[in-house]
Amino acid sequence: MTANQTEAEQHILLVEDSDVDYETVLRAFRKGNLSNPVIRCEDGDEALDYLHRRNRFAAPGAAPRPALVLLDLNLPGTDGREVLEEMKNDEKLKDIPVIVMTTSSDQRDVERCYRHGANSYVAKPVSFDGYMEAVRRLHSYWFETVMLPEPVRR
Amino acid sequence: MRSDKQKAAVLSVSVLGAALTLLTILTLCLLYRTSLRMETQRLEELVHSQAALIEEFTRIAAKNYPDYTGSTLEAAVTSVFNAHIRKECFGATGEFLIARLEGDQIVFWPGRQHSADSIKPIPMQSQLAEPMRQALSGRSGTVVGIDYRGQTVLAAYHHLPTLGLGLVAKIDIAEMRTPFFRAAAEAGAAALLLIGIGMAVLLRFNPFLRRLEEERLRAQSYLDLTGIMIVLLDCGGRIQSVNRKGCELLGAAQDELAGLFWVNHCIHPADRDAAEEALRLLLSGEAEQIDGMEFHLCTMCGEERIIEWSGRAVRCRQGRRVISAGTDITERKRIERCLQEAKEEFQATFEQAAVGIGQVNPEGRWLRVNRKLCLILGWSADELLALRIQDVTHPAHLERSMAKAKELSANPALSIYQMEKQYLRKDGSAVWINHTVSLVRDEQGKPKYYISVIEDIQKRKEMEDALRDRTELLVRSNKELDDFAYIASHDLKEPLRGIMSYSTFLLEDYGEQFGGEVRDRLRTIGDLAGRLSTLTDDLLTFSRVGRLELARRQVDLNVLVEDVLATLRVTLERENVWVRIPKSLPTVVCDAVRMREVYYNLISNAVKYNDKPEKWVEIGALRPWNDPERSVFYVCDNGIGIRDKHMDKVFTMFKRLHSGNKFGGGTGAGLAIVKKIIERHEGHIWLESAEGEGSIFFFTIVQRHEGQIWQEGAGGASALQRRNPL
């Protein structure tokens, strides 16, 4: 973690339609004493609105730029794959690391996601313990190990 | 033939010569007799004239000269006598003798005799000097008798009673005969010469004979040249002569054949009655000619030939004879039989063929159809023959069909085409057929007729359609299965995870408020959901193994197995398992990920199902020395083993042999997945096991290269280097 960035500033955007998974992630953060704010979008369209700061996220400050996106693939409406593609094709958004976190372990999905610029692909562990461990490791990697780009202030 | 004629010629000439000689001798005899008579007359006249002379002289002398007596008179007579007779007028042996009887001795006067010496007196009783003895006996005449020398002579004798003298004039018979003998000898020689000349002329220069001979030779060469056997039979049915072809056919020389009975020696016993009857008809005159009979001939070397036989009666001095002619038709018969057989064979093949066959003329009209074709099309043969191929072709295929036929007839390089099309049956229904057409051309290369082979493929077409439908169904079904697997992996797992999470949340948030039983149940809910999730994962893996393409490449199994063992290290150490790899494993072409799965499952099973205190696992490969690509791989353990009756069940999906809690549990998918992976590698997997002692799992794979070959590990690299030194 760099000196000029606090955990509180580093938002995590969680694109997840499943309530239980959302709750699991929150619980994992809580249990792991991780303080990053987690913003949840329930589907792809909402996630894109958030990222582009439009519609209900159009108000200034309504949508802080996330340091990391945790993206589920199978979403109602615009699904995670489209969200990923659009993000990685967008000059402003392509530098935000996207971690695909999904139940699908289909190799086709894995390949497709990496080809479109996903930064990690994680299959959701089935058990809560596994889930918690996965979240802890991800946090440790992305916020304690690697360097992330400076968020562009607008 | 030749000798007969010669004999006749020689005989006739000889007879002619003999007759001539006889005539000559007869003539000579007559001449001789005449000559003898004339000579006798001459000698008689001579002796008479001499006697008269001597008597007259004696009478004159006695009258005028009385002193002429005794020896004086004798001398005078002798001189007169000698003077008178010239010796030459008698010929060479002619003599005139005078003798007187003194006592019983005949004493000759010296006179005209051959020898200069005087003739010695001869006794009257002797056999010699017969004419003189006759004369001195007082007789006169002629005689053929022996003279004083012992020679046979012709003599005339006369007795002079007045003087007591006998006169004899004689000549040797031999001298008289000599000219006649000579003449006879000359005549004989002339006759013999004549006979010789005659014969020579007759035999050599007689144009008739020569022509006859030439004719005979020519006829013989005709007979010999001809390819027909000609046998001349005599009136008894014996062979008189045979031409060359006949000798060839019968396998014997003419000399050997002559005299044999035609029917008994040459005709096969089965045909003898017919041959005998034919011969009888000809010899008896009931028939002059018989043609077109077929006989089996027995040759002298025991072969059988077939001849077409004709016989003709000819009359000759000896009676009726038969010229029999035979053509060897053995080969013709054989060819005819072959042709017939071939025809029947063709007919049978044509008629009984399992496919429809038809001959079609260039205009498309059926010339010939077989039964199967009629069956396929539902027309009778007669009805079909009134139709053209265009009439029975489905309109949809007519144009293409005609174009093909046109192409075939226009291009001499083509001889056959084949197409699948529909024909119309009599009832109007369409039938799918496979039509193979070949074109038969005449010598000029112009189309003569087409041979159409028509195979009813209606059933095949229907089956193909059914197969296509089924394949589509299968593809769809596979897709659905695929989708199902996907749904199972995602959509089914999400609620599962929900169940698990919530049961965990409940335990975490309210665990203190629940009793121990409730906590256990909640934990069980979580475990069951986890188990269902594992099952779902295995099912997905299993379906993926069958669905996804293998990524084959060179894989060093040593590296791969080491990798698996590293993954299992914790378990291996905990269970105290001794893993041994007796020999370095080969480098093979396979899908590394799948193969790792195979080894992972087999090794972990070997460890899991083992109750021995000292566990071991052996991993190896049996490599046939002559074919390293056909290695048999094995994983062997000293575990609990598998009962015989369960051996075929272990590879069944989700089939477990032990209850859920024993041996660490499991879904029962591992070996099913292993079997599927091995089968994807076109190999086999099987096992040998003794319950309580351990199991060996064997498997083979077919090493096939697909796509790019990747290096993996040192073994892989060396394998690649071996293959491509650059």
Image (cartoon, grey):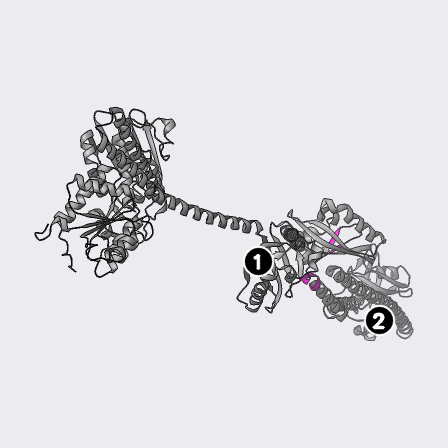
Kind of residue sitting beneath label 1: Lys
The quarter of the picture where the C terminus of chain B appears is bottom left
Find disc 1 in the rendering and name its residue: B421
Query: Of B309 and B485, which appears nearest the observer?
Result: B485
Where is residue B96? Give x, y as percent.
82, 68
| Between discs 2 and 1, the one toward the N terminus | 2
Indicate the chain on which mark 2 is placed: B
Kind of residue sitting beneath label 2: Val
Distance from disc 2 to disc 1, alpha carbons, whole Å, reads 161 Å
Magenta part of the protein: which range? B221-240
Q: For residue B406: magenta?
A: no
**Quadrant of residue B71 within the rendered picture:** bottom right
Where is residue B313? Give x, y as percent.
81, 56
What is the residue that sits farthest to the left in this orientation?
A3
Q: Residues within 10 Å of mark 1 (few under 14, many from 20)?
A: some
Label at residue B77: 2
